[in-house]
Image (cartoon, rainbow, N blue to C red):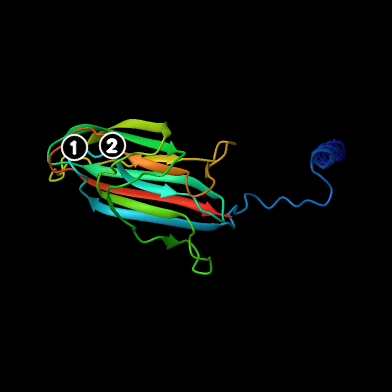
Amino acid sequence: MKKLFFFLVLSFFALLSNAYSLYTPAGTVDVGISNSEGQKASYRVQVADITPVATATDVFTLCGSATKVVRVNRIQVTADSTAPAVIDFYVFKRSAANTGGTSTAPTISKFDSADGTATATVALYSANPSALGTGALFTGDHYALPAAASTGYPGAPWIEDFGIRNNRAIVLRGITQCLAFSLNGQAIPLGFGLYFGIEWTEE
């Protein structure tokens, strides 16, 4: 009986081994999940403690490059106000750049110091553009603002990731294509403060 038992056990494992070989391509090794770090030149802008104008339209824009294809893969926004409130966030993809207004160019950070200088251009507006570029609403949402001085819940970030569900990132081709984070002219709550981050690659 013992010999029969061991024979059956060995036969079972032999069958398992054969079945595994049928579904494992020759020459492969099962090493678990690998690191899928991207190798494209990658950049980020982060701005903090921003107080937009009272009826802000575009607050921030990222415009494409004359020499590279720009792919936006993340937008992250956090905000608060003096008292709890709700505000709407908008992201427009524009086929023409804004004109007028007052803006500065925030620092662009590299993910790898060996990457070249970013060729996309960024603008943080302290006065609304006099004319907004032609475009369409790409994404947006309501955002619940916590009170800045509250000891209660912090403001959860509003995050939009692109190119992670078998779809493309947001692609900007040429200097006239821009992605704009906008408040669309709505009234700004009292004591409103904004954190905004955006990530993209260039190739």
- The kind of secondary structure element at disc 1 is loop
59 sits to left or right of 70: left
Image quadrant of residue 121? bottom left
Asked whether the beta carbons under mark 2 and mark 1 sit within 8 Å of each other, the answer is yes
Residue 26 image position (x, y, % from top left): 84, 48
Q: Is residue 154 visible?
A: no
Image quadrant of residue 55? top left
Which residue in the structure is indicated by mark 1?
Answer: 188
Q: Viewer-proximal residue, 121 or 149?
A: 121
Q: Residue at x 18, y 37 (%)?
A: 188
Q: Quadrant of the N terminus?
A: top right
What is the crowding at mark 2: few (fewer than 14 residues within 10 Å), some, or many (at least 20)?
A: many
Residue 107 image position (x, y, % from top left): 36, 61
Q: Quadrant of the C terminus?
A: bottom right
Mark carried by residue 183: 2
Circle nearer the N terminus (2, 1): 2
User: Which residue type carries mark 2?
Assistant: Leu
Q: Is residue 110 visible?
A: yes
Q: Viewer-proximal residue, 62 or 200?
A: 62
- The kind of secondary structure element at disc 2 is loop
Q: Viewer-proximal residue, 180 or 169?
A: 180
User: Which residue type carries mark 1?
Assistant: Ile
